[in-house]
């Protein structure tokens, strides 16, 4: 630990947080809410940006793709960054990057500058969630971590749900620049308050930065996420020469990106296994020596894949099959997102008292049952039934995610908290990209096949949606089976976790 570090824990685990520790966590929760809110505001604005900036749909989509790619590249590195830099330094760095990117976006003269701004924003966003989760694990006593991780569920569920609605209101009244103009002063205020009140948690190390690991990480995780994002384009169908050429290019790009990603990721893992012998790894993979952590990450991968795949397909079903407007679509999925977020603290409290299985087992069964129902939807399914099914799915996921966050990280030694947090974020990013890609590819392929077989467009799209959800339902059975094996870490290790 450096001499100027303000150590918040010098004795074995106290029973509750001090006012200063509580203030740190709430500041981090607020900052994380702001940066994650920003993640989802861009999708609704793409049609407006195409007109105002005179760009194509493909170019506009890069404003979302670049953000996602940057997150996939930066998050794996945060495990090392949180070891190398103090809590205060990481907070100021992350919020400064996010605020700078937001300011550049608000005043961007054209598409190119706006794209750079989104990359800067994503760099800051990628730091905040691992920082929040690592700080919670370091400060919060084991017996109370579930409730606090439930607050993290509020952040990661409610903020993305509010984003599109807020974006729609701003676009209709003020214009797209104000999406960033509204967020900017909030981000700056959070930065200034955090710079004053956030103090340092835990110890830092002086491990050297391994440039080769950074390059391999960027190529590996970035290649996988970008390759997965191209699956939808590669599966597109059309009879025109332009459509065929576009599909061929997308297919080639997809395979090149995936191949580079797989090879680079393999080399990255090999490199980390060597470096971790000297405690110099960029992403220490010894976390997977914990059986409970490994099983929980498998659960997280399956649930994230089905969750993000559902988020991508359900709006298309509501708009293309049921003929609803984007605003109606947002209102339909809003109750589920709010349920998923606001039940987080209650679910966390249940975890603290009774452990994982009372939540994860029924939660995974509920989520799987909802997906099996979605695999039966059609052109005449009542909207209220869709709302009820989505709320049910969201509740099942909420009963799973909060215990998984807490049990997985709680299974690790304290020195591995930052690496574990980085891996949790990485699994979510990669699995989310895979879920979106696979669900959309299946939906598009079945839809095209049905149309070529003579089906009407709406009926064909309904068949494609059912096929995508059927795949998700089948995959979800893996989470049901795995739910029986996740355990709550023993609270008696708490003193060892907090001792310095």
Image (cartoon, rainbow, N blue to C red):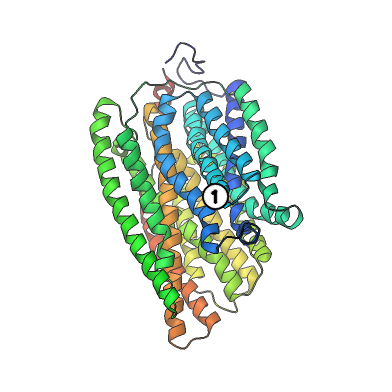
Of the pair 9 and 441, the residue shown nearer to us: 441
Q: Quadrant of the N terminus?
A: top left
Residue 443 drawn above or below residue 305:
below
Q: Quadrant of the C terminus?
A: top left
Residue 73 image point, x, y percent: 41, 43
Of the pair 124 and 166, the residue shown nearer to us: 124
Residue 192 drawn above or below residue 36:
above
Residue 304 image point, x, y percent: 45, 53
Relative side of 265 to 18, left or right: left
The answer to which quarter of the image holds residue 27 is top right
Relative side of 66 to 208, left or right: right
Q: Secondary structure at mark 1?
A: helix
Residue 80 drawn above or below residue 224:
above
* Pointer 1 local density, CA inside 10 Å: few below 14, some 14–19, many at least 20: few
Relative side of 378 to 81, left or right: right
Q: Residue at x 70, y 47 (%)?
A: 178
Q: How many marks?
A: 1
Residue 152 drawn above or below residue 395:
above
Q: Residue at x 59, y 59 (%)?
A: 391
Residue 98 image point, x, y percent: 57, 38
The answer to whether residue 493 of the structure is visible from this angle is yes
Relative side of 422 to 188, left or right: left
Residue 203 image point, x, y percent: 43, 20
Identify the residue under disc 1: 112
Q: Residue at x 36, y 51 (%)?
A: 223
The answer to which quarter of the image holds residue 147 is top right
The answer to which quarter of the image holds residue 101 is top right
Q: Residue at x 57, y 62 (%)?
A: 390
Of the pair 187 and 415, the residue shown nearer to us: 187
The answer to whether residue 410 of the structure is visible from this angle is no
Residue closest to the far top: 3
Of the pair 140 and 491, the residue shown nearer to us: 140
């Amino acid at each position: 630990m450096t001499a100027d570090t303000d150590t918040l824990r010098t004795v074995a685990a106290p029973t509750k947080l001090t006012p200063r520790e509580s203030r740190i966590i709430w500041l981090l929760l607020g900052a994380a809410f702001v940066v994650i809110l920003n993640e989802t505001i861009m999708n609704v604005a793409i049609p407006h940006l195409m007109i105002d900036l005179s760009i194509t749909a493909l170019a506009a989509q890069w404003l979302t793709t670049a953000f996602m790619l940057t997150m996939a590249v930066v998050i794996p590195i945060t495990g090392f960054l949180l070891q190398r830099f103090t809590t205060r330094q990481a907070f100021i760095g992350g919020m400064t990057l996010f605020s700078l990117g937001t300011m550049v976006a608000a005043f961007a003269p054209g598409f190119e500058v706006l794209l750079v701004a989104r990359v800067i924003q994503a760099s800051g966003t990628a730091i905040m969630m691992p920082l929040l989760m690592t700080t919670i694990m370091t400060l919060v006593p084991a017996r109370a971590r579930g409730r606090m991780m439930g607050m993290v569920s509020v952040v990661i569920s409610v903020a993305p749900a509010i984003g599109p609605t807020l974006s729609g209101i701003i676009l209709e009244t003020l214009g797209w620049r104000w999406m960033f103009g509204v967020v900017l002063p909030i981000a700056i205020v959070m930065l200034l308050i955090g710079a004053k009140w956030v103090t340092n948690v835990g110890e830092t190390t002086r491990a050297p930065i391994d440039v080769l690991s950074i390059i391999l990480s960027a190529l590996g995780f970035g290649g996988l996420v970008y390759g997965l994002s191209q699956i939808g384009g590669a599966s597109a169908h059309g009879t025109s020469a332009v459509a065929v050429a576009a599909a061929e290019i997308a297919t080639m790009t997809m395979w090149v990106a995936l191949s580079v990603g797989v090879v680079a990721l393999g080399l990255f893992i090999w490199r980390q296994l060597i470096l971790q012998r000297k405690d110099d790894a960029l992403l220490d993979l010894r976390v997977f020596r914990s059986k409970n952590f490994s099983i929980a990450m498998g659960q997280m991968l399956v649930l994230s894949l089905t969750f993000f795949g559902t988020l991508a397909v359900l709006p298309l079903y509501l708009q293309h099959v049921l003929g609803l407007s984007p605003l109606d679509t947002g209102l339909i999925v809003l109750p589920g997102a709010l349920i998923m977020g606001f039940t987080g603290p209650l679910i966390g409290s249940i975890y603290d008292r009774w452990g994982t299985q009372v939540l994860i087992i029924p939660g995974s069964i509920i989520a799987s049952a909802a997906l099996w129902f979605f695999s039966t939807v059609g052109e005449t399914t009542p909207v209220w039934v869709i709302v009820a099914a989505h709320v049910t799915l969201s509740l099942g996921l909420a009963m799973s995610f909060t215990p998984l966050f807490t049990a997985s990280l709680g299974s690790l030694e304290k020195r591995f908290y930052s690496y574990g947090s980085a891996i949790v974020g990485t699994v979510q990013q990669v699995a989310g990209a895979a879920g979106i890609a696979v669900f959309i590819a299946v939906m598009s392929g079945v839809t095209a096949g049905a149309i070529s077989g003579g089906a009407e467009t709406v009926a064909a799209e309904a068949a494609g949606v059912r096929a995508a959800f059927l795949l998700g339902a089948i995959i979800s059975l893996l989470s049901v089976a795995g739910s029986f094996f996740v355990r709550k870490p023993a609270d008696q290790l708490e003193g060892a976790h907090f001792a310095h």
